[in-house]
Amino acid sequence: MSIGSNSPEDERPFHDVPDEKRPSVGHALKQARLAAGLTVSDVSNATRVRLAIVHAIEADDFAPCGGDVYARGHIRTLARAVHLDPAPLVAQFDAEHGGRPAPTPAAPLFEAERIRPERRGPNWTAAMVAAIVVVIGFVGFTAFKGGDGGGDTQAADGSPSPTVTKSPSATPAPAKPATPKSDPSDSAIAAAPQDKVTVQVSAANGRSWISAKDHNGRMLFDGLLDKGQSKTFQDSTKINLILGDAGAIQLYVNGKKIDDDFRPGAVERLTYTKGDPEVG
């Protein structure tokens, strides 16, 4: 759900005014919201930024955002929702909070992925093939030894050795391939129980780091999704997500596609419950 797309000329930038006369970031966002005739609930529903965080930002309290990186993202999102140019507001926030934060290096994320390899089950197909090879080798060796004994008897007494009839060895049944485990399909997600929240995260447009927790704060997943991979999470109350590159992610919540236009490289913190996505 969104308030509507805004063309660049609809966004109202700050005019060049002295710093002492310029309103604070939160006050500017609140004035623009009131001028647009919107309530805090309207903005929260349109941007999926929680009510408490919207109230805190309008009061120039950025602690609930969880860090400067997330605060800058929320400022951009709220500014677009109330038809403001976000760039001057983000620049003002950076000037008041020690400058723009350094980007998070990608190396630790790849190191974490190498430290936590996914656990794989035993390769039953390879074990079965090895067992078949051992059985066939044993049968062949036994038959060869029996043939050598018959030749020795003929050389000793000059009489032909009796013909040995070899019974055909039983052909072992082919190994049944293991059925690979996979995430629930889209049809399974669509049929998810209504008393739970089901979220599918797909790396449709590239690689992204994601983190998912349940309503108790228990970590469900923390790692990288390569392009084309997906993960499905389910909880009785809510799922909390952090997307490292939201532009690479496609979300399905309770069987419905989320059409939020996430920008490439943007970090998003999202929470979904049993009632999401909201009707309308």
Image (cartoon, rainbow, N blue to C red):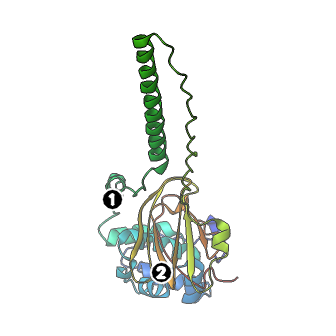
Q: Is residue 158 above or below residue 207?
A: above
Q: Position of residue 175 (x, y in %)?
A: 55, 47
Q: Position of residue 220 (x, y in %)?
A: 43, 71
Q: Residue furthest left?
A: 98
Q: Which of the 4 image quarters holds residue 38?
A: bottom right
Q: Are marks 2 and 1 in contact (CB under 8 Å)?
A: no
- Residue 28 visible: yes
CA gap between label 2 and label 1 equals 26 Å
- Decide: few, some or many residues near mark 2? Use Cα within 10 Å; few <14, some 14-19, many ≥20: some
Q: Position of residue 125 (x, y in %)?
A: 50, 47
- Under circle 2, the secondary element is helix
* Numbered circles on residues, count: 2
Q: Position of residue 115 (x, y in %)?
A: 31, 55
Task: Decide which of 267, 11 is in the foreground and name it.
Answer: 267
Task: Decide which of 231, 106 is in the foreground and name it.
Answer: 231
- Under circle 1, the secondary element is loop
Q: Earlier in the sequence, mark 2 or mark 1?
A: 2
- Decide: few, some or many residues near mark 1? Use Cα within 10 Å; few <14, some 14-19, many ≥20: few
Residue hosting label 2: 28
Q: Residue at x 64, y 83 (%)?
A: 278
Q: Residue at x 32, y 53 (%)?
A: 111
In this picture, residue 269 sits left or right of residue 163 = left
- Residue 256 visible: no
Front: mark 2 or 1: 1
Q: Which of the 4 image quarters holds residue 20?
A: bottom left
Residue hosting label 1: 102
